[in-house]
């Protein structure tokens, strides 16, 4: 099968879809290079958009780039193209994360294209969810979606859910006591630090959601301790419905797989009518991350805690223009 020619309009449309992916603090740590001569799009990580204090190993950066890679695959399938991906193709360049070439038509049994409608609808919701349980058949579908990407999604029992929420609370205390972490978060939230454009990156104040009331919030309070005009307080669900996404190993390749699985799960959840948010707080502290793993599960390393439920959908957060993240060669 010959490689599909990469025209500028085609590549631009593919990347527009890819960059709807979530990333830590909406830093959007990806760069794409379209090699028009070979029909390959390269995905590179951007270490300048990393979080040295919260993500020193760049695991979260790889997750975000993996999510963008999955969005690119969905965009290709939607356009009747078959994406062929090679992870970490350059041994000499650890920031060259993937090569993607495109063949056509898409596989007849591929279900990637149906997820395309969710790309623009998926937004992190930092609002309270109802106590209505997510049906088991919906959870089973999300677990199957993760398996398709070589990862596992595990729904913890009541006792381990309580453990994870205790870790969330502990991470809040750690964060409050660490000025460097608070400074790093402040640089990517609200109005942003000097030199950053709040209209294209970071988490704007309108996406913070309400402050917690009565119980420990399952979402990170990006507004603390700052005053955000007009921000209200709300009571969050007492027992959040969460799922743990993980892999057997803890390597950059597995992180990229986990990022793709994360995006696949989030998109499927969106199509299923669920609201979602990501809870990475306890995974950013080595002394807490190992305790997030359920010892009875098949997951060796947890990469993300996903909160699922029924409630208000989040609002879209800014995205950098494609011209900033895409180069042609």
Image (tube, rainbow, N blue to C red):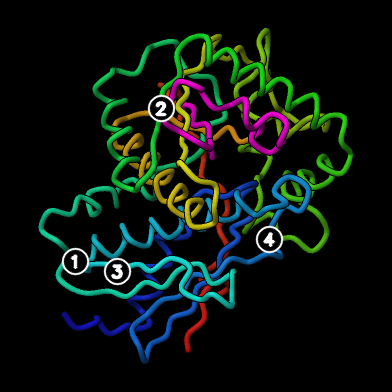
**Residue 94 drawn at (x, y percent):** 59, 69
Q: Disc 2 versus disc 4: distance between alpha carbons?
A: 30 Å
Q: What element does badge 4 sit on?
A: helix
Q: Disc 4 versus disc 3: distance between alpha carbons?
A: 27 Å
**Residue 306 drawn at (x, y percent):** 49, 31
Other residues around mark 1 within 10 Å, as few (<14) / some (14–19) / many (≥20): some
Do tag 4 and tag 3 residues touch (Cβ < 8 Å)? no
Q: What element does badge 3 sit on?
A: strand
Q: On the image, numbered disc 1 is attached to which residue?
A: 80
Earlier in the chain: of badge 4 and badge 3, it is: 4
Residue for point 32% across, 32% down: 143
Q: Quadrant of residue 126?
A: top right
Q: Is residue 207 toward the left or the right of residue 153 in the image? A: right
Q: Which mark is residue 49?
A: 4
Earlier in the chain: of badge 3 and badge 2, it is: 3
Q: On the image, numbered disc 3 is attached to which residue?
A: 84
Q: Disc 3 versus disc 2: distance between alpha carbons?
A: 28 Å
* View extreme (bottom): residue: 37
Q: What element does badge 2 sit on?
A: strand
Q: Quadrant of residue 76?
A: bottom left
Between 83 and 252, which is closer to the camera in this rendering?
Answer: 252
Q: Is residue 79 toward the left or the right of residue 70 in the image? A: left
For the question of whether residue 308 can be seen, the reply is yes
For the question of whether residue 20 can be seen, the reply is no
In magenta, the rendered stretch is 281-307
């Amino acid at each position: 099968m010959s490689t599909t020619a990469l025209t500028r309009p085609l590549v631009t449309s593919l990347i527009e879809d890819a960059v709807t992916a979530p990333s830590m603090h909406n830093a959007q740590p990806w760069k794409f290079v379209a090699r028009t001569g070979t029909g390959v799009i390269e995905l590179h990580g951007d270490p300048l958009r990393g979080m040295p204090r919260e993500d020193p190993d760049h695991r979260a950066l790889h997750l975000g780039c993996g999510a963008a890679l999955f969005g690119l695959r969905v965009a290709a399938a939607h356009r009747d193209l078959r994406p062929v991906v090679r992870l970490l193709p350059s041994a000499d360049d650890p920031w060259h994360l993937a090569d993607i070439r495109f063949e056509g038509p898409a596989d007849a049994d591929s279900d990637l294209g149906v997820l395309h409608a969710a790309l623009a609808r998926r937004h992190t919701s930092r609002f309270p969810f109802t106590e209505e349980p997510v049906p088991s058949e919906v959870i089973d579908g999300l677990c199957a979606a993760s398996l398709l990407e070589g990862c596992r999604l595990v729904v913890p029992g009541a006792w381990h859910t309580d453990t994870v929420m205790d870790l969330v609370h502990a991470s809040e205390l750690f964060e409050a006591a660490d000025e460097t972490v608070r400074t790093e978060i402040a640089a990517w939230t609200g109005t942003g630090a000097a030199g950053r454009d709040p209209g294209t990156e970071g988490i704007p104040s309108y996406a913070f959601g309400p402050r917690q009331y009565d119980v420990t919030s399952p979402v990170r309070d990006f507004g603390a301790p700052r005053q955000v005009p007009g921000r209200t307080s709300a009571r969050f669900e007492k027992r959040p419905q969460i799922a743990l996404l993980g892999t057997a190993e803890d390597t950059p390749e597995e992180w990229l797989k986990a990022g793709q699985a994360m995006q696949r799960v989030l998109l499927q959840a969106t199509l299923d009518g669920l609201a979602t948010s990501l809870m990475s707080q306890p995974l950013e502290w080595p002394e807490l991350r190992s305790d997030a793993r359920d010892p009875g599960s098949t997951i060796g390393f947890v990469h993300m805690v996903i909160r699922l439920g029924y409630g208000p959908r989040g609002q879209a957060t800014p995205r950098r223009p494609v011209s900033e993240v895409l180069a042609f060669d």
